[in-house]
Image (cartoon, rainbow, N blue to C red):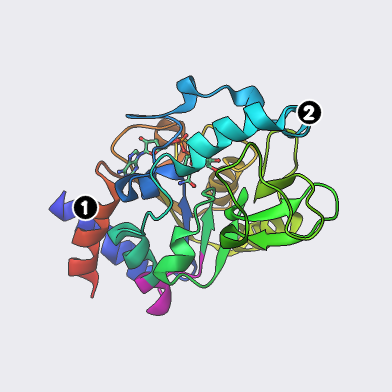
Amino acid sequence: MENRIKKVVETIKNAKHCVIFTGAGVSVESGIPPFRGEGGIYNDLDTNDLRLSTYISKPIKSWKTIKQMLFKAGHDYKHNKAHEVIAKLEEAGYCKAVITQNIDNLHQEAGTKTIYELHGNGKTFVCTKCGHHDNFQEVDIDVDFPTCSKCDYLTKPNFTFFEEGLPTDQYEGAIEHIRKCDLIILVGTSGEVFPAANMPLHAKKNGATVIEINPDITFFTPKIVDIIINGKASVVFSLLEKEMF
Ligand code: NAD
């Protein structure tokens, strides 16, 4: 592991445009379960409840599932060492952007500034009728289904439901960085959710070096990964921080 960390640090220092691409695994050590991998909740969820059409037609059932998915770890989970070191890499000029599939806002809370949220953000709400945005604190979540503070109609967490497209501005901003990057670091993502998983494939096609940090092998491992660090995100980023700064 030590030699690989050294190699990763050297690769980051030599990169001109490094992008970090994260998934649910980066937040596991904050207490938020992933979809897949150890402790994954995917098999326990009725994924129909994550469809926009179900949310609108059966909000009570759908909200119960979403609440379990979003808030199983409690309402006040905190960023961990991996989020912190990722923010530090940006501050030091080594990382140009974070592209995340996560909806938990933890990168921002740790200090990351340039971030593209491919699947939106679960800590804000958008009304299904008037489009008004509410912050998490403005909406009562311990009810049958959440309602808009302005018109009292059904509001929905502002993450991408099945049947919805990715947020265009986030997608386009992320793609700009994917085109430019010569290094992409994949952290805690299974690579099974498309079209997001196309981004690392594009980066590799454009000649970027690919580093993967994950305790398991993933869809990406045999296909595009150049340097594998098998380990938990916060452990690996702690070691990386010691070697780097
Ligand atoms: P995933 O659940 O499909 O896969 C999680 C990956 O993280 C697995 O490869 C697993 O081996 C790895 N992992 C587990 N523990 C880890 C650790 N401590 N350190 C590093 N890696 C670890 O996640 P995905 O690829 O992001 O796709 C799932 C989708 O579900 C995403 O679109 C995301 O929006 C959503 N989701 C988000 C959250 C969140 O915001 N925290 C949580 C669950 C699901």
- The answer to whether residue 193 is seen in the rendering is no
Residue type, mark 2 in image: Ser
> Residue 244: x percent and y percent?
24, 70
Residue 133 vs 87, above or below: the answer is: above
Residue contact between numbered discs 1 and 2, judged by CB atoms under 8 Å: no
- Ligand 1 location (quadrant): top left
Residue 92 vs 2, above or below: the answer is: below
Q: Answer whether residue 93 is magenta in the image.
A: yes
Which quadrant holds the C terminus? bottom left
Residue at 46% from the left image edge and 43% from the top image edge:
71
106 left or right, relative to 202: left
> Residue 206: x percent and y percent?
58, 52
Which residue occupies the foreground of this view, 109 or 101? 109
Residue placed under numbered mark 1 in the picture: 235
Residues in magenta? 88-97
Q: Answer whether residue 106 is magenta in the image.
A: no
> Residue 53: x percent and y percent?
78, 30
Residue at 34% from the left image edge and 71% from the top image edge:
13
Residue type, mark 1 in image: Val
| Cα distance in 3D space between marks 1 and 2 | 43 Å
Mark 1 sits near ligand 1, with its Cβ under 8 Å away = yes
